[in-house]
Image: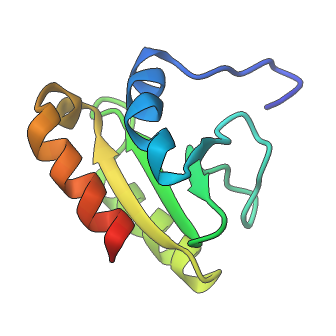
Amino acid sequence: MIARNIVPNKSEIKLGKMISKFGFKFVGDGQILILKKSPDFINKKQKKIIELFGEPFHTKEEARKRISLFTKQGFKTLIIWSKELSNKTKLQKRLIDFYEN
C-alpha cells in the first residue's frame, strides 16, 4: 500500500480531524498491518482501532470479521460508516464513548 502511495481520502481526512485529539493516527496506508490487514486509524497507547467503512464498498459481515480479527490481537475496534459523518453531533458522542471506555 505504501508503494501505491495511498493517502487519506476526503472522508478519512474529515474523520481524522475529529479523532486526532483522542490520539488516533491515520495508518490506512499500510504503516501498520495486523494479520495482513491495515486498519484506518489506530491509538497504540489504548490499543484501539477506528475503521471508516463506505457503504458501497464494505458489508456488515466484513465489519464483524474485522472486529473479531483485531479483538484477537488485543485491540478494541469501532466501525464508523461513512453516512455517519453527516451527523457530527451523534458521531462525536460515539467517538467520545469509544475513547473513554
Q: Judge whether 24 appears above or below 52 on screen.
A: below
Is residue 60 found left or right of 74 in the rendered image?
A: left
Q: Residue 98, percent across and down?
A: 32, 65
Q: Judge whether 49 appears above or below 45 on screen.
A: above
Q: Could you tell me which quadrant the C terminus lies in? A: bottom left
Q: Place residue 86 in its image quadrant.
A: top left
Q: Place residue 58 in its image quadrant.
A: top left
58 or 86: which is nearer to us? Answer: 86
Q: Place residue 65 in its image quadrant.
A: bottom left
Q: Residue 60, percent across and down?
A: 28, 56
Residue drawn where x is 35% and y is 54% of the image: 79
Q: Judge whether 44 appears above or below 75 on screen.
A: above
Is residue 20 found left or right of 3 in the rendered image?
A: left
Residue drawn where x is 81% and y is 20% of the image: 4
45 or 13: which is nearer to us? Answer: 45
Is residue 28 found left or right of 16 in the rendered image?
A: right
Q: Judge whether 57 appears above or below 59 on screen.
A: above
Residue drawn where x is 51% and y is 18% of the image: 9
14 or 31: which is nearer to us? Answer: 14
